[in-house]
């Protein structure tokens, strides 16, 4: 019926999606989503309070059925961040029941138990809905090195192409039960973790939070996690051993450290596979279910995706010799449709000959396998698999009246990969006998009121001045605790 969810045509009553304790069959999900579709039909864009709940799944599917771009809003986002997302996306209403005040749009509660429309009456049928493959299905907000997050327009066709390529690489079928507990406002948890299961037709169990015990109890055949999740699973050997019955464990969103891959392999009997991607490109490379699982490597380009390496300085192509390091660039059907309202930034993210610049430094082996060796900019931090722009956290810190200067970096962290550390010049904040510890707590709370919780600095160092080069630019490499 629709471009994205052919499996929803299968009108049977077996449990299809479970989020926490709430379970719906495909027919029930379709009925609830069709009700949402009827409510949002014709809107330019609709925001979704993207908590980990069945209401979020129903809301997103409803928007997709209606052919209306859905804008997931992180449930823990502070007023500044969500205000930006709602204004920038021009969302006409917000689906959900958040306890947020001063919203610029009306809220509409969503009831997963609602059933009014039948699939034949879907507004998408009359408006074109997901039948238009180039149409934006999702607008996902993501951080750059500076400034406020940008809305990445993800076309329905890109999602369909990516999910089909992943299903092929992972031998993902309706016989699988997918388990994960990742956030429903990013590609990993939402596109792969919800839309993937719905498109393939596999059962989905969302554990609300990605804890080792919840993963162990869910009895899935296919599991998704970010490296922090797999590291925590390894620290709970009983839960890890329970995953031995699964067919495939998949890691992504940040580099999986080799020792974690080895520990997980020892505890579960098979190594996880790793895949690589970005909000702007969706998943572009992956190891295969039936292929080699090489620690530190993220597999070959997915079907119809083309990759190349380019020299940072000269822009010249580099050989896929397993040694040359260059910027990874991508072409293919999974690419985004641009940053919403930012044609200038969109243009700058592509080369003159039409390749998307990932900003990741990589190596490609002669057999086509990729290894991500780092990012070109230190101002994009990956913490717990979340992408965080140093500039956004710096701006939030600088909004505090007593902060004069601020610089934010990602420091290596065993649990999170990187943890956010802020170096702050604020003599008035720690003056008057006030401890720097108390001042740090205040400042962290201040940031949390502005931005999402995971963007809070984990540590704040008060310094008398920031190290700068002769041009006045902060030398972030010189910032160490
Ligand atoms: C967190 N806490 C803090 C601070 N930060 N307290 C004080 N100061 C801080 N700076 C609190 C939290 O609110 C929480 O409290 C408690 O400490 C534990 O936090 P944390 O260690 O962060 O654990 P967590 O909340 O369990 O988070 C770890 C996580 C999470 C579950 C792995 O980072 C996560 O869900 N990551 C997934 C990100 C993701 O999906 N990325 C995909 C992007 P309390 O317990 O009271 O709540 S898409 C992508 O990357 C591409 C396309 C791709 O390739 O997939
Ligand atoms: P995001 O836009 O949140 O999707 O973050 C995308 C970034 O995550 C990429 O540009 C990479 O830097 C990083 N990333 C995703 N998957 C991997 C992986 N398997 N290994 C290393 N880095 C990864």
Image (spheres, grey):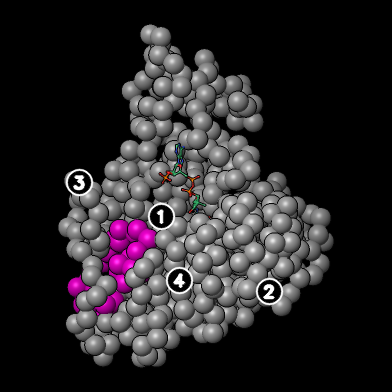
C-alpha separation, residue under disc 4 versus residue under disc 3: 32 Å
C-alpha separation, residue under disc 1 versus residue under disc 2: 29 Å
> According to the image, label 2 marks what residue?
288
Direction from residue 13 to residue 178 in the image, left or right:
right
Q: Which image quarter: residue 261?
A: bottom right
C-alpha separation, residue under disc 1 versus residue under disc 3: 21 Å
Q: Which image quarter: residue 33?
A: bottom left
First in sequence: mark 2 vs mark 3 = 3
Secondary structure under badge 1?
Answer: strand
Q: Where is residue 306 in the image (x, y as percent from the top left)?
A: 65, 70
First in sequence: mark 2 vs mark 4 = 4
First in sequence: mark 4 vs mark 3 = 3
Determine whether label 4 and label 3 are within 8 Å by CB.
no
**Is 253 colored magenta in this rendering?**
no
Q: Which label number is shown at residue 101?
A: 3
> According to the image, label 1 marks what residue?
141
First in sequence: mark 1 vs mark 2 = 1
The residue segment tinted magenta is: 32-59
Secondary structure under badge 4?
Answer: strand
Q: In which quarter of the image is the C terminus?
A: top right
Judge depth for marks 4 and 3 and give the one in front: 4
Residue reaching furthest front?
Answer: 238
Q: Can residue 68 be seen in this view?
A: no
Q: Which label number is shown at residue 205?
A: 4
C-alpha separation, residue under disc 2 versus residue under disc 3: 46 Å
Identify the residue at horizontal 68%, vertical 69% (top origin): 287
Secondary structure under badge 2?
Answer: loop
Badge 2 crowding class, 10 Å Cα cut-off, few under 14, some 14 to 19, many 20 or more, is: many
Determine whether label 1 and label 4 are within 8 Å by CB.
no
Q: Position of residue 25 (x, y in %)?
A: 36, 82
């Amino acid at each position: 019926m629709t471009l994205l969810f052919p499996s929803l045509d299968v009108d049977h009553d077996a449990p299809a999606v479970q989020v926490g304790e709430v379970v719906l069959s495909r027919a029930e999900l379709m009925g609830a989503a069709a009700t949402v579709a009827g409510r949002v039909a014709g809107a330019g864009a609709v925001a979704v309070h993207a908590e980990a709940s069945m209401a979020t799944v129903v809301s997103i599917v409803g928007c997709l059925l209606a052919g209306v771009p859905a804008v997931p809003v992180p449930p823990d986002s502070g007023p500044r961040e969500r205000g930006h997302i709602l204004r920038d996306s021009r969302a006409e209403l917000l689906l959900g029941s958040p306890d947020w005040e001063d919203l610029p749009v009306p809220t509409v509660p969503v009831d997963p138990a609602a059933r009014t429309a039948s699939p034949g009456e879907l507004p998408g049928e009359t408006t074109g809905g997901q039948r238009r493959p180039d149409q934006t299905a999702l607008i996902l907000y993501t951080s750059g090195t500076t400034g406020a997050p940008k809305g990445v327009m993800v076309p329905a066709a890109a999602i369909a192409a990516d999910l089909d390529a992943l299903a092929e690489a992972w031998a993902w079928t309706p016989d699988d039960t997918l388990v994960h507990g990742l956030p429903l406002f990013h590609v990993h948890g939402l596109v792969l973790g919800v839309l993937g299961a719905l498109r393939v037709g596999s059962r989905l169990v969302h554990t609300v939070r990605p804890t080792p015990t919840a993963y162990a109890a869910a009895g899935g055949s296919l599991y998704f996690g970010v490296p922090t999740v797999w590291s925590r699973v390894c620290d709970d050997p009983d839960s890890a051993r329970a995953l031995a019955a699964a067919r495939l464990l998949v890691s992504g969103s940040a580099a999986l450290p080799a020792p974690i891959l080895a520990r997980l392999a020892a505890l579960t009997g098979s190594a996880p596979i790793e895949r690589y991607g970005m909000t702007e490109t969706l998943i572009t490379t992956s190891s295969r279910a039936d292929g080699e699982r090489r620690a530190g490597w993220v597999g070959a380009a997915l079907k119809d995706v083309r990759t190349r390496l380019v020299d940072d300085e000269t822009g010249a192509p580099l050989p896929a010799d397993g040694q040359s390091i260059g910027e990874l660039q991508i072409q293919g059907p999974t690419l985004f449709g641009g940053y919403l309202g930012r044609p200038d930034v969109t243009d700058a993210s592509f080369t003159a000959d039409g390749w998307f610049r990932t900003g990741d430094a990589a190596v490609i082996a002669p057999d086509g396998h990729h290894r991500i060796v780092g990012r070109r900019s230190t101002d994009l931090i990956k913490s717990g698999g979340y992408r965080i722009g140093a500039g956004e956290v710096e701006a939030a810190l600088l909004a505090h009246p007593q902060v004069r200067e601020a610089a934010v970096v990602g420091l290596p962290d065993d649990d999170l990969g990187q943890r956010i550390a802020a170096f702050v010049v604020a003599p008035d904040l720690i003056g008057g006998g006030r401890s720097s510890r108390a001042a740090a707590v205040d400042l962290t709370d201040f940031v949390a009121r502005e931005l999402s919780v995971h963007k809070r600095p984990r540590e704040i160092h008060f310094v008398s001045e920031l190290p700068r080069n002769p041009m006045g630019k902060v030398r972030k490499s010189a910032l160490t605790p």
